[in-house]
Amino acid sequence: MTGFLIHVPLIYVPFSFPCPGSCIRATAAVLAALLLSACTDGESAPGRTSAQGGEPLVVARIGEREITLAELDRSIQLPQHDLALAEYRLRAGALRQLLEREAGDGGGASAEWLLEPPAPPREELPVGGRPLRGNPDAPVTLSIFCSYQSPHCAALQATVRQLLESYAGWLRLVHFDLPLRYHREGPRATAAVHCARQQERGWPYADGLYSQAQKLGDETYLRLARVQGLQPGAFTQCMAVHDSAPALQRDLAVAGELGLETVPVVFINGLYIRGPRPYEEYAHWVDAELQRLGHDSSIPHPQASRFAINGGGPGETDLPLVLTGTSVSSERDNSTALIAVQDAAATSFSNGSSLMQGVRLESIRADHVLLDNDGTLERLSLRGQEGEGVHVPLTSPEPRDKETMRRIEQPEGETRKLVAPSGVLPLGRKWLAEQLRNRDELEKRFVEAEHQVDGHNLLKLEGIEDSEFFAALGLEEGDVVVRVNDTWVHSDQNQLWDALTSGQVVDVTFMRNGRPQRIQYVVEEKGYFEEGDSGDGESGEGQENKADE
């Protein structure tokens, strides 16, 4: 259509708009007000007080107390915004059709889109004291109200990870638990994340729960704990106590005060966005907040690599240092590390010690230490810790290039993109290495299916009902594994094993009951920057670890 150019604000293109009970009530109130004003030809309706000389408009009185329209609007500003947004979408759709009609009449003139979406209201949220993901000092806070049993919340997680990766250092995440009334496993899932957080695995554990939102239950909670290297006894004991209820009630109270009745709901520095929405919409408001606060989001944050969500943490240092032992205490100041500097004899260092010019000991873990090398965080592993068996590196923080992603999402010969991933499931490195020692037995569970690709039979899973490995990966009896990353899986090739030990994100597409499904896996170990993490490992008071002599 020559000469016809319009710009539709990207963030509000979809027009579907579910309306909760509070939204319906607000709609009725707005329509009633419109009808009253229409019936009086601009005169005040009976019982309604007009503002005089800039005085606040009073809408009701209770004894001596007056209720103003501004006070009333503050109490319903979120559903009012939902209504304004619905109105904007209706207008945008009608305007788009009108412009297309006008252009189709042969005028040939370019069109300029001037209709603007309503700005979201801003709420003050009590984020203090809650676990944070990302940079604790980030200028932008992503506050999410979600339920671990919600498929819509599960679908949002890939977008959240993309935001935390794209804006690493600029963004931090705060989670508010909001299980809906019909989410029977919601409170129990919240307790499981609480128990995982006690072992410094709260965020990866939550990722794992979202990837299995349709299978929540005690068996799933305990299996996921084992997969991520938690101590099963301590986890089970914590679940029996179920002491996460007070925190859950606090979150429910916050949601109640805001009038939230659905999930997910996202607040970006308090800006209200009812979701789930596309990545581009959230990114738009993150950029707007950064610009408002004087930051340039096109410039990577100075500590972006430290807070990148897709990475397994800092890379191994190449400094002339050898870590020969650690003593990890529950008190940060009491932890020590035996480190040989430049071929000298090993010396005991504590957190904060200077090792070399510009190199400081940042924190001590059971099997490694973290170094601050002129502002860059690096890892020094305990000598001799790799051991024998299957080597499984942590997931690389490097994103896959666009062409690789195109091949993953839209294989050759396909006219449509594959289904979006249902979640990202973190796998513990030690657990995965132990499982892959039985690779030959696991591979026998792949048998030829009837369907073919490239002249080879596809592979389906049989005899896996009692397999922790396949259950942990979210696979079931009869699933047909179609692709691993950008490679077809069939009787002549199965790249699953190499992919799991590649140190890259693993993208698996499979068919279940004739429908395609997709899930991603990352290999992680205990998070480096969990809220409340002192930098120490999980060892008890005075426990020591020494390398092989």
Image (tube, rainbow, N blue to C red):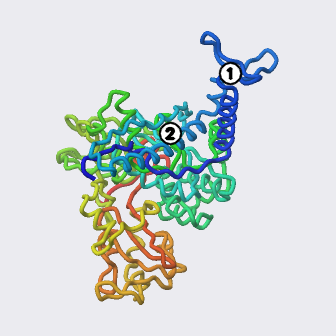
Mark pair 1, 2: CA separation: 39 Å
Judging by the rendered image, the residue that carries numbered circle 2 is: 267
Residue 240 in picture, x, y percent from top left = 67, 57
Residue 141 in picture, x, y percent from top left = 45, 37
Say which of 415 and 530 sits in front: 415
Say which of 318 and 25 sits in front: 25
Residue at the far top in the pictured view: 53
Q: Callout 2: helix, strand or loop?
A: strand
The earlier-in-sequence mark between 1 and 2 is: 1
**Residue pictured at 44% horizontal, 39% vertical:** 332
**Residue pictured at 68% horizontal, 58% vertical:** 184
Judging by the rendered image, the residue that carries numbered circle 1 is: 43
- The nearer-to-camera label among 1 and 2 is 1
Q: Amino acid at mark 1?
A: Glu
Say which of 280 and 517 sits in front: 280
Q: Quadrant of residue 342?
A: top left
The C terminus: image quadrant? bottom left
Q: Amino acid at mark 2?
A: Phe
* Res 194 visible: no
Residue 393 in picture, x, y percent from top left = 31, 62
Q: Callout 1: helix, strand or loop?
A: loop
User: Seen in the image, is 178 located left or right of residue 458?
Assistant: right
Assess disc 2: are there few (<14), some (14-19) or many (≥20) residues with their C-alpha within 10 Å of its C-alpha: many
